[in-house]
Image (tube, rainbow, N blue to C red):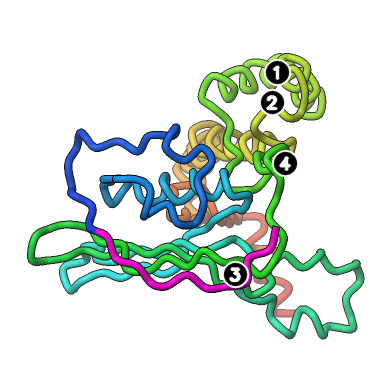
Amino acid sequence: MMQSVKEKTIKREFEVKEEDVVNDDAFIGATYDWWKRFEMKVLKDEAETFYNMLARVAGFSIRKDDLKRDKNGDIISRKWVCSREGQRAAKFIENDKRQREPRSLTRVGCEAAFRVGLNRKDGKWIVKEFIGDHNHNLVDAMNTQFLRSHRTISNPDKAQVDVLRKVGVKTTQIMDYMVKQSGGHEHVGFTQKDIYNHVDAMRRSEIKDGDAEAALAYLCGKAEMDSSFFYKFNIDEESRLANLFWADSTARMDYARLEMS
């Protein structure tokens, strides 16, 4: 399915009301003239959900793009694009010294986009831009679930993964179990890589609250016992241990002798 003709930029007001909810049934069988067929009211925070639902029906994946704020830091414009928007940087394509085969190209300059903006006069959000055409083939309904913006591990599945991991089940075995439990890959809703990412995030969290704190407590105790003991560390934006350095009195004396020799 190829799209070749650009849609005209359209504007439509969305009333900001808490009771307004995007209805999934409204998108079944929808085409790119959805704004002519359906009366929809969404909050700004629901705009991404709406565009992603439209993308799932059409057969593409989305990602966040431009975001604009006013002088107070409040969001006044938000844009989402097709995941195949843009181009891979030339320096990566033309690199002839690479040791591994380059990844397949995923960005092909697709211009499909959806942008909403805040109308300051009445506090309503307006669709400022909608480009529905794609310069690439769209994915069929059977495989859309494997596109990045449509993959997600539900909280119950995460809990199950965590339990299996704690009793020593390998990630590959967990994935096999989840596939069988769901009745096939087409019903799982995520990939093995997503499980690896979740497990990695959990390990980092455990390090944050466990091993890292234990290590720092040990070093602090050493410093109290040895006045020449030195240690220093820093953390990242998520309060995780990023770098750690230490030197005891013996190491510092050896280093001093090395400098003198």
Residue 51 in the image: state x and y as whole percent. 45, 51
Where 34 falls versus 155 (above or below)? below
Query: Residue 5: x, y in percent?
Result: 57, 73
Query: Which sits in the foreground, 230 or 84?
Result: 84
Q: Quadrant of residue 108?
A: bottom right
Judged from the image, the secondary structure of the residue bearing numbered disc 3 is loop
State the SS at label 2.
Answer: helix
Graded by Cα atoms within 10 Å as few (under 14), some (14 to 19) or many (20 or more), the crowding at tag 2 reads some
Q: Earlier in the sequence, mark 4 or mark 1?
A: 4
Q: CA distance from mark 1 to mark 2?
A: 6 Å
Q: Which residues are magenta?
A: 1-12
Pointer 4: what residue? Answer: 143
The mark found on residue 85 in the picture is: 3
Mark 1 / mark 2, whichever is N-terminal:
1
Q: Residues within 10 Å of mark 1 (few under 14, many from 20)?
A: few
Between the C-alphas of marks 3 and 1, the distance is 33 Å
Please tell me which of labels 3 and 2 falls first in the chain. 3
